[in-house]
C-alpha cells in the first residue's frame, strides 16, 4: 500500500493519518490536514483496491460494502500502521484519523475492529454499512463526524447510525451537519480544527 509521510516541523509528536475518498489518492486531503493542524506529522495512505476503475480502500458490493474486502484490507491497514509507526518513530496514541467517504468508512472500520491506540477521528461523509464490530474499547476517543443535509451518497441518517455504533464502544462522538451534499465544504474544516484542539 502506497503512502506519503511528511514530518512535522519542530519535531511535533502529533500525527494525522489520512484516508482519501473513492477515486482519490494520498495527496487529496493534505489541505484538509493543513486546516485541522498545520504543525502535525502527516501520514497519508492510498487505497490498495481498484473497483469500477476507481482506487478505494475496499470494494463495494452493490450499494453496500464487500465484507471480505473490508476485513482483508482493514487487516492490511492495521499492519501497515504498526510498521510505519515503528519506521518513522510515531506515537500512535498521539495520532488521529481523518477520512472522507470510502476513506471515512475505512477509518470507522479501524476504530471499530482494530486496537490501534489513536486519540480520535474525523469522519467526513461516511456511511459504515457493515456489521463488522470487534471487541474494542473506544473510551476516551473523540470522534467528529460531518454530513451534508443534501448528501445522497452518505446520508445524515447513516452518520447517526455510525455515531451509535461508536458510542456503544465508548467513544465521544459529535455530528456536525452542513447544508451541502457529498463534497467537503469549508464549514467542515473549521469544525475539524476546533475538534482537534480537544484531541491533541
Image (tube, rainbow, N blue to C red):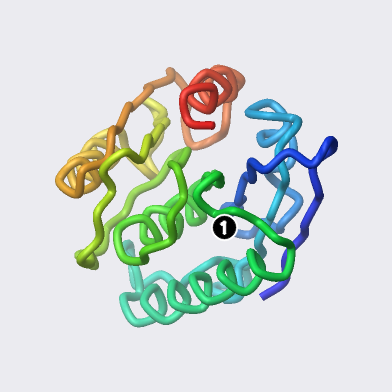
Which residue, given by chain and number where applicable, does mark 1 sit on? Answer: 22
Q: Is residue 173 above or below residue 177?
A: below
Side of 38 relative to 130 (left or right): right
Q: Nearer the viewer, residue 184 or 44?
A: 44
- Identify the secondary structure beneath mark 1: loop
Side of 67 relative to 87 (left or right): left
List x then y, in percent, for residue 63: 33, 62
List x then y, in percent, for residue 157: 23, 36
The outermost residue toward the right is 9
Q: Residue at x 62, y 74 (%)?
A: 83
Q: Nearer the viewer, residue 118 or 164?
A: 118
Residue 49 occupies quadrant: bottom right
Q: Nearer the viewer, residue 146 or 61?
A: 146
Q: Residue at x 56, y 47 (%)?
A: 95
Side of 49 relative to 126 (left or right): right
Q: Residue at x 23, y 67 (%)?
A: 134
List x then y, in percent, for residue 192: 53, 26
Residue 109 occupies quadrant: bottom left
Q: Quadrant of the C terminus?
A: top right
Q: Is residue 60 above or below residue 100?
A: below
The outermost residue toward the left is 168
Within 10 Å of disc 1 (Cα), the crowding (few <14, some 14-19, many 20+) is many
Q: Residue at x 52, y 71 (%)?
A: 77
Side of 148 relative to 44 (left or right): left
List x then y, in percent, for residue 173: 30, 32
Q: Quadrant of the N terminus?
A: bottom right
Amino acid at each position: 500500500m502506497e503512502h506519503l509521510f511528511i514530518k512535522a516541523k519542530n519535531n511535533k509528536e502529533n500525527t494525522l493519518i489520512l484516508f482519501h475518498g473513492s477515486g482519490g489518492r494520498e495527496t487529496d486531503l493534505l489541505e484538509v490536514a493543513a486546516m485541522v493542524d498545520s504543525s502535525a506529522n502527516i501520514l497519508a495512505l492510498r487505497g490498495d483496491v481498484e473497483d469500477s476503475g476507481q482506487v478505494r480502500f475496499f470494494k463495494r458490493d452493490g450499494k453496500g460494502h464487500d465484507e471480505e474486502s473490508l476485513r482483508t484490507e482493514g487487516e492490511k491497514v492495521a499492519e501497515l500502521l504498526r510498521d510505519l509507526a515503528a519506521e518513522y518513530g510515531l506515537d500512535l496514541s498521539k495520532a488521529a484519523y481523518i477520512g472522507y467517504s470510502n476513506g471515512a468508512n475505512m477509518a470507522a472500520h479501524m476504530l471499530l475492529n482494530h486496537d490501534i491506540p489513536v486519540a480520535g477521528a474525523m469522519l467526513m461523509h461516511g456511511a459504515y454499512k457493515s456489521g463488522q464490530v470487534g471487541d474494542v474499547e473506544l473510551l476516551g476517543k473523540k470522534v467528529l463526524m460531518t454530513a451534508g443535509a443534501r448528501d445522497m451518497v452518505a446520508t445524515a441518517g447513516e452518520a447517526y447510525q455510525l455515531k451509535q455504533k461508536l458510542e456503544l464502544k465508548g467513544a465521544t462522538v459529535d455530528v456536525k451537519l452542513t447544508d451541502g451534499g457529498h463534497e467537503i465544504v469549508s464549514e467542515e474544516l473549521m469544525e475539524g480544527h476546533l475538534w482537534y484542539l480537544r484531541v491533541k
